[in-house]
Amino acid sequence: MPIRIHPSILSADFANLEAELGRIANADLAHIDVMDNHFVPNLTIGLPVVERLQQVSPVPLDLHLMIDDPDRWAPLYAETGAYSVTFHAEAAADPVKLARALRERGARAGIALKPGTAVEPYLELLPEFDLVLVMTVEPGFGGQSFMGSTMPKLSRLSHAVRASGLDVWMQVDGGINDDTIAIAAEAGANTFVAGSSVFGAESASAQIDHLRSLATEHSHD
């Protein structure tokens, strides 16, 4: 599978989001963190802002819903035209039913796992998803340090996906930078969320190309 870089606007200038999205026009998708101050102890943006970002973004949107009751809300986010919508396994009442609802609305369906969430219950459900997000930090805040302890889980998932021949993206989110992207790529990730390392760079577009090159060098695929 190709390497994908999804810069997270959590590290962007929220007063100038349209301009910030323009800085990452060479990214594969723009990663949009939706937090509700319930599932995670932070509050970011909601449906009206996502709808507007959908209208102005030069790249498709990759929505990461860190919210309670995604069974109710995630389909509405898919209806904005988002390319991909990811909900948390820990918050969903019926992950399979929800994933199917997202696909019916034209979005790729993703499921996210916190660092402490076991992967085994979801291995047999992989055909129901288009993306699995292994959180490499605790969800809720940007700028955290990469948790290498999550790599065995990523490797287990990646091996299961390759063995099955499924088109399931393996995504990592949290602390991804020049040093850690190689570690995650070697463990099987092919889709990388990077926030501060991209938006904090003098040239966000050059940093995206740099991260993509580093990941490609260490990719299994």
Image (cartoon, rainbow, N blue to C red):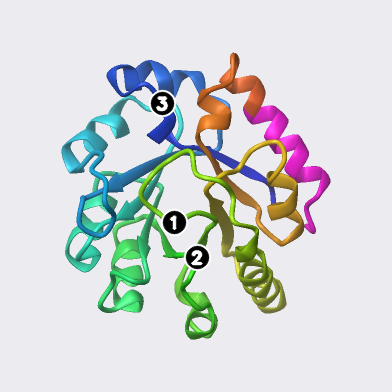
Residue underneath mark 2: 115
Q: Which mark is residue 138?
A: 1
Front one among 106 and 153? 153
With respect to residue 169, does 58 lie above or below?
above
- Please state which amino acid type lies under the numbered disc 2: Pro
Look at the numbered discs 3 and 2 and tell me whether their residues touch, using CB distance below 8 Å: no
| Residue drawn at point x = 45 percent, y = 75 percent | 128
* Residue 217 inside the magenta-drawn segment: yes
Q: Secondary structure at mark 1?
A: loop
* Residue 135 inside the magenta-drawn segment: no
Q: Secondary structure at mark 3?
A: loop
- Please state which amino acid type lies under the numbered disc 3: Ala
Front one among 144 and 80? 144
Q: Position of residue 37 (x, y in %)?
A: 21, 50
Q: Quadrant of the N terminus?
A: bottom right
Is 16 left or right of 26, judged from the image as shown?
Answer: left
How far separated are the C-alphas under marks 1 and 3? 20 Å
